[in-house]
Image: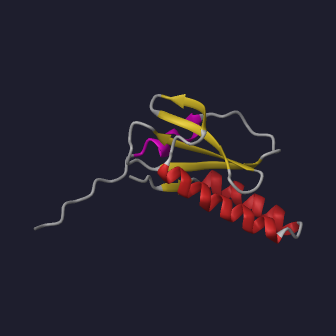
Amino acid sequence: MSRIVRRHPDFEADFLRLLDGLVARGAEGWVRTLAEGVAECSRLLGRFPAAGTCLERRGNVALRKLILPRGPYVAWYACDESEPAGDLWLVRIFHARQQRPPARVTRWLSAASARPPKRRKSPS
């Protein structure tokens, strides 16, 4: 069973900042590499949510990092490991040489521990 991989607004803001920087430098090839790397990361984590290294754990929710398969980028993601069908949230993305803030899963705890809505049975 695959998890749904979602992007937190913090991830989106980081991603757009990285893209803007690449475009400003005229590095169109790296723009494509970053976008493909994020897509590949999402596919991988949807199937193998424990693929990354655990940075912090709070109860059943883990904050992990994964080095993207393409390009020098690191993604942080969070998920409730007790919910195999729960969503996985990409929460931050950094250049590998970028200084990172302390890893605190509590910032994204509510998103990572949110349960997907129950599917309704269709009337027979």
Q: Nearer the viewer, residue 10 or 76?
A: 76
Q: Is residue 104 left or right of residue 102?
A: left
User: In the image, residue 25 lies at what x, y percent?
Assistant: 89, 66
Q: Residue at x 70, y 58 (%)?
A: 15
Residue 20 sits in which quadrant?
Answer: bottom right
Query: Which range of residues does the magenta coloring cover?
Result: 105-114
Q: Nearer the viewer, residue 66 or 6?
A: 66
Check if residue 107 falls in the magenta segment.
yes
Give the total number of marks visible in the rendering: 0
Q: Residue at x 71, y 57 (%)?
A: 70
Q: Nearer the viewer, residue 117 or 87?
A: 87
Q: Is residue 8 left or right of residue 61?
A: right
Q: Residue at x 76, y 63 (%)?
A: 19
User: In the image, residue 121 lies at what x, y percent?
Assistant: 19, 60
Residue 33 sits in which quadrant?
Answer: bottom right
Predominant secondary structure, magenta span = helix
Specify the farthest residue to the right. Answer: 25
Whether 49 is drawn above or below 7: the answer is above
User: In the image, residue 4 lies at what x, y percent?
Assistant: 45, 55
Q: Residue at x 77, y 51 (%)?
A: 72
Figure colour scheme: secondary structure
Check if residue 14 falls in the magenta segment.
no
Q: Nearer the viewer, residue 11 or 88?
A: 88
The quadrant of the image that shows the C terminus is bottom left
Q: Is residue 118 left or right of residue 81?
A: left
Whether 104 is drawn above or below 86: the answer is above
